[in-house]
Amino acid sequence: MARTARDPETSLLLDLLAEAYEKKSWHGTNLRGSFRGMTAAEAAWRPAAGRPNAWELALHAAYWKYAVRRKLTGEKRGSFPLEGSNWFRRPEGEPAEAAWKADLALLAAEHRALVAAVAERLPELAGAARAKALHLVRGVAAHDLYHCGQVQALKKLRPRG
């Protein structure tokens, strides 16, 4: 991912986003890494009725990356590739590897789009608009790490065999 950060805050936030989602960092597994090697059936397992599974957490994270990007760019609401918002019930029917991989690809695409928006828009902002944007971007990085922890816990809770 090419970075054209023009100021230290933008550079720092791009680093935070990368460490929370895809780059090696001191804390261990990042969000993308938490899904590594997970099958569709494993991603579909839920600890109890009404509780999210790893698959739903992946799409939830993708949605909030989209929502923050939309706030940075002024993009129209309702442009997320899936119908609905925030939580998306998965799987639709039996867990299918192709559907799981497609939803992981959506998460990756939303991450790349967010990083591009931060690199482009943040250096242009000042005052209250910049402060709000900084808050949102820090929040989406923390959101990735929060849900990474949930995925890691689900992996430990899931029955083996």
Image: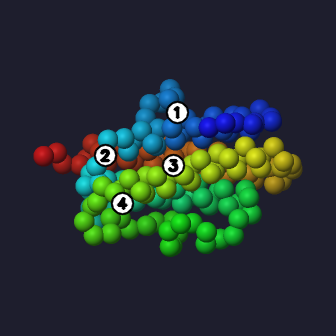
Q: What residue type is labelled 3?
A: Ala
Q: Mark 4 points at which residue?
A: 99
Quarter occupied by residue 4: top right
Disc 1 vs disc 3: Cβ atoms closer than 8 Å? no
Q: Which residue is drawn at 58% across and 44% down?
A: 141
- Secondary structure state at the residue bearing disc 2: loop
Q: Could you tell me residue 122's position as x and y percent?
A: 77, 46
Q: Badge 4, how many Cα within 10 Å: few under 14, some, many 20+?
A: some
Mark 3 and mark 2: Cα distance apart in space: 15 Å
Q: Give the label, 4 or 2, closer to the camera.
A: 4
**CB-based contact (under 8 Å), mark 1 and mark 2:** no
Q: Which residue is drawn at 39% across and 48% down?
A: 150
Residue at which label 1 appears: 23
The amino acid type of the residue labelled 2 equals Met
Q: Kindly identify which residue carries mark 3.
A: 108
* Element type at mark 4: helix
First of labels 1, 4 by sequence position = 1
Real-space Cα distance between discs 1 and 2?
A: 18 Å
Q: What element carries label 3?
A: helix
Report whether 47 appears left or right of 64.
left
Instruction: Residue at 61%, 69% (x, y): give it.
Output: 79
Read off the residue under disc 2. Answer: 38
Res 80 seen here: yes
Q: Position of residue 44 (x, y in %)?
A: 29, 58
